[in-house]
Amino acid sequence: MEIQSCYRCKTRITAGENILKMLNKYRKSSSAKTVVVMLLVCCFLLSCKRLSNDPLANWEAITVEPAENAVILQQAAESPCVWKVGIDARTHHFKIETTANVLPKQGKEVRLQIGAGTLVGTNGGEYGGGLSLVDSDGTSAKSLLTENVIQLLPLNSGALVFTGILHLGEDKGAVWSYSKAGDHDWSIKKLADLDGSPRAIYSGDREVLAVTGHGVSQIGQTLNLTKIASLPFAQTLPNSISEDAQKRIYIGMNGLVVRLTQTKAGYKHEWFTKSGCLR
């Protein structure tokens, strides 16, 4: 297993003291030397700023992307480290933290208030689930789907519905919309099939991201689905997906954190771990 270490830069206070010493030392020197020193100082500050904006700056980077059933994935599946990514509710900053081992929840109920009433989704795993619409006074419910509902997200015209099942050899999922167009009645429509049951979902400013055991998909503003990364996540149990301020995508899971960075050629994949997490 090839692992490359990343290191933090010095604190801003120490950096500032060092810069002041450098400037005092060279302030009476020739103008050419002063220009060189100032350029070095600028490069130093920019380098530290980049590191300070990197939540994985002190993590270990895995230099070779794991293939399906790689030993490193088996190690991660049994890792005592379970990483969760997300936005801190108090500071609104991106964070990576440890969490308890996250398994798919069954018997979970999700609700969403929309113009037509309240959507209620249930997930019973292999025992089945469903989506119902409860009217505004709560006296009657209309069945809309007989699928396990994983998540409900609001739309301007209704709701996005994520369904899926992960049981034994069955691993499937889909995205639906429940909406009303113009004078037409409310209706449920399948937008697209996913490559597996959604393990985690993130709603950003312009798009929705869903991670499965096989990769990451994106639902755009026009509700089109695009698979942006095919990745072997089935063993590592992804539990969360989020974006930082630079729009880099992070996936938290057992033993590892994966970062996706958009480039002209597509998305760059980077895998990270911490010392002691892979045994």
Image (spheres, rainbow, N blue to C red):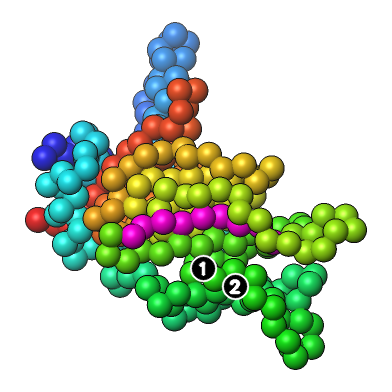
User: What is the residue that sits farthest to the bottom in this orientation?
Assistant: 139
- Secondary structure beneath dot 2 equals strand
Instruction: Judge whether residue 172 is colored magenta.
Output: yes
Q: Residue 131: which disc?
A: 2
Q: Is residue 212 visible?
A: yes
Considering the image in quadrants, where does the N terminus appear? top left
Q: Which residue is mark 1?
A: 147
Q: Residue at x 42, y 25 (%)?
A: 43
Amino acid type at circle 1 is Glu
Q: In this orientation, which residue lies closer to the viewer: 39 or 97?
A: 97
Amino acid type at circle 2 is Leu
Instruction: Judge whether residue 63 is colored magenta.
Output: no
Q: Which residues are drawn in magenta? A: 170-178
Q: In this orientation, which residue lies closer to the viewer: 169 or 136?
A: 169
The answer to whether the residue labelled 1 contacts the one labelled 2, judged by CB atoms less than 8 Å apart, is yes
User: Mark 2 Cα within 10 Å, few/some/many (few <14, many 20+)?
Assistant: many
